[in-house]
Amino acid sequence: MNLPEIRQLKIFIALEETRSFTAAANKNFITQSAVSHSIKSLEKQLDCELIQRMGKRITLTPYGEVFLHHARRVINELETSITKIETLKHWGYTSIRVGASDTICQYVMPQVLKRFAKKHPKCEVTIDLGDTLEMQKKLAHGRLDLAIGIHLAPSDNNFIFTPLAEDSLCFITAPDHDWVSTQTNRGGSLTDIRLIAYSAESETMRLITKHFHDNTVKYRHPLTLGNMEAIKEMTQNGLGVGIIPPWVARKELGEGKLVAHTISSPAPKRNWGVFSNSGKTFSLPEEEFITICREELNNAIHKGRELNHA
């Protein structure tokens, strides 16, 4: 099968966006009959109907929905490549668009960017903040090159997962909490404890929920907050028991402002890594960026483990 032409993809996308042959024609500076001919030619080439006409209304068939998703990715990738090439020609610069969670941005990325800039001073790194699932959507639409996140859900064939590090979660309390002075047997119930955890829609929260379910632990629905600093602050003020990875609280644990407690044995673990689109080949700067991320994240996690003796 001959591959569709870029012109055909742009016409098809314009038709879906406008749902009008006339508007799609105007958007592409061609005639209405040229739009109709292009769509018919595309359908013949793919041997399936992409659109349905119901009077003046135009809708996509299931084949059309699938084709639209990939057509947009192709156009986005081409536009991105042209932008990068133009930037490189004019300034000698390359770029990497990275998605990362609030935790990674705050505790790991500053050192990563500092080291990377020394090796690649002409490679611009832009960071887009968000949780794993949100970043995967942006990857799929060609808006990111790499996304640093947690691998928990079943593997998606649209993405490649490159492992970085593994960490575990623990409970944290204020130093005057009852758990510090007594050997409390938490057993299978946490219903009398106010838990404070990370974002309700995050992979971390999904992992906590799954872990408690698998270990038949009864608990009250946690108070969920948007970043780890807020969790630590509320915990220090005695407003509940936080659930975090110890490495993000290594300063407070070292100063005795917080105390770590094991959740269970083994503790719930998170697998951190870099998501990229299936079939992608890493550039040299991307490979080195991933290597630095792996080293810095593992270093942070190792320092946290040293403080987590509870």
Image (cartoon, rainbow, N blue to C red):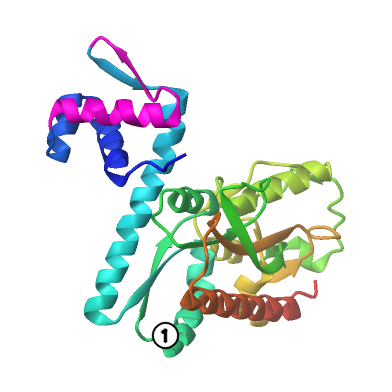
Q: Is residue 229 visible?
A: no
How many residues crowd around disc 1 within 10 Å: few (fewer than 14), some, or many (20 or more)?
A: some
Residue 45 magenta-highlighted = yes
x then y, percent, for residue 71: 38, 42
Residue 149 left/right relative to 258 = left
- Residue 253: quarter of image: bottom right
105 vs 82, left or right, is right
Q: Main secondary structure of the magenta part?
A: helix
Instruction: Determine the residue positioned at 75% across, 81% down.
Output: 306
Q: Which residue is mark 1?
A: 120
Rendered-image quadrant of the C terminus: bottom right
In the rendered structure, does residue 285 fall within the stretch colored magenta?
Answer: no
Residue plotted at (15% across, 38% down): 27
Q: Nearer the viewer, residue 71 or 167?
A: 71
> Residue 252: x, y in percent?
61, 76
Q: Residue 24's x, y, as percent? A: 19, 32
Instruction: Indicate whether 37 appears above or below 124.
Output: above
Residue 92 against residue 233 in the figure, above or below: below
The answer to whether residue 277 is above or below residue 71 is below
Q: Nearer the viewer, residue 24 or 253?
A: 24
Q: Secondary structure at mark 1?
A: loop
Please identify the residue farthest to the front as the structure is shown: 1
Residue placed farthest to the bottom in the image?
118
Q: Is residue 264 visible?
A: yes
The residue sitting at 58% across, 78% down in the picture is: 291
Specify start and end residues of the magenta stretch as a single range: 31-55
